Amino acid sequence: SCREDMTLDPDTAHPELVLSEDGKTLRQTNTRQDLPDNPERFDTWLCMLGREGFTSRRHWWEVQVGEGRWWAVGVARESVSRKGVIIFSPEEGVWGVRRWVGHYEALAAPDRTPLSLDRVPSRVGVYLDCTLGQVSFLDADTRALIFTFSPASFAGGRIRPWFLVEFGEIRLSRSQ
């Protein structure tokens, strides 16, 4: 599988999210920046997409989640709704895992799937196989599996890296 050198797409960022100059670190501020409300931008949830979009082959990237109190990482269809409240689930075009108030969950519908992890991951690896329609998450340091979603059809549109951060920051690891 191919390890990707990811960057974040500022045009999709919620106005309370600040992106570093190198396009790798995303952090939440309590100040809403004066940004254009373009169609690509998330306006309710503190989300952002990666610049890259995938339609084929296998892809792998790593996200430093550190001590963030509330974060989510995964993938989303290019067509994912950006405006208003979204229920994050495969049905809505999002495959992700999140840390929320000290608990870890897979964003699988209809209910969240609680995850019991042996250790708190500092880096989460995202593995995307467009051909098989598979999304998996691993502890990037130990390679322990966190969660694998049921296979999905990714036909008809690009799949993009998806991020949510509140109370903290996340950083995309540079490819080695």
Image: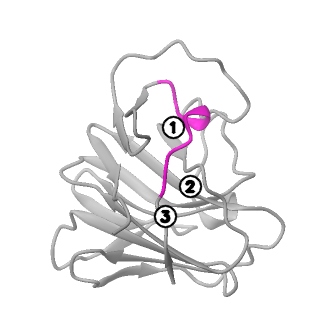
Q: How is the image coloured?
A: one colour
Measure how far apart labels 1 and 3 are at the Cα level.
14 Å
**What's the residue type where badge 1 is placed?**
Trp
Query: What is the crowding at mark 3: few (fewer than 14 residues within 10 Å), some, or many (at least 20)?
Result: many
Q: Is 47 located above or below residue 127 in the figure? A: above
User: Which mark is first along the chain, 2 or 3?
Assistant: 2
Q: Residue at x 73, y 62 (%)?
A: 158
Whether residue 78 sits left or right of residue 50 in the image: it is right
**What's the residue type where badge 2 is placed?**
Phe
**What's the residue type where badge 3 is placed?**
Gly
Kind of element beneath mark 1: loop
Residue topped by disc 3? 96
Whether residue 170 sits left or right of residue 121 in the image: it is right
Residue topped by disc 1? 45
Q: What percent of the width, then of the height, locates residue 64?
A: 28, 57
For the record, the magenta segment spans: 6-15
Q: Residue at x 28, y 85 (%)?
A: 144
User: Which mark is first along the chain, 2 or 1?
Assistant: 1
The answer to whether mark 3 and mark 2 are in CB contact below 8 A is yes
Query: Splitting the image into 4 quarters, where does residue 12 fall?
Result: top right
Residue topped by disc 2? 88
Measure how far apart labels 3 and 2 are at the Cα level.
8 Å
Q: What percent of the width, then of the height, locates residue 79?
A: 75, 51
Measure how far apart labels 1 and 2 are at the Cα level.
10 Å
Q: Is residue 21 magenta?
A: no
- Furthest toward the top, the residue is 34
Q: Is 123 located above or below residue 70 in the figure? A: below
- Furthest toward the right, the residue is 156
Query: What is the crowding at mark 1: few (fewer than 14 residues within 10 Å), some, or many (at least 20)?
Result: some
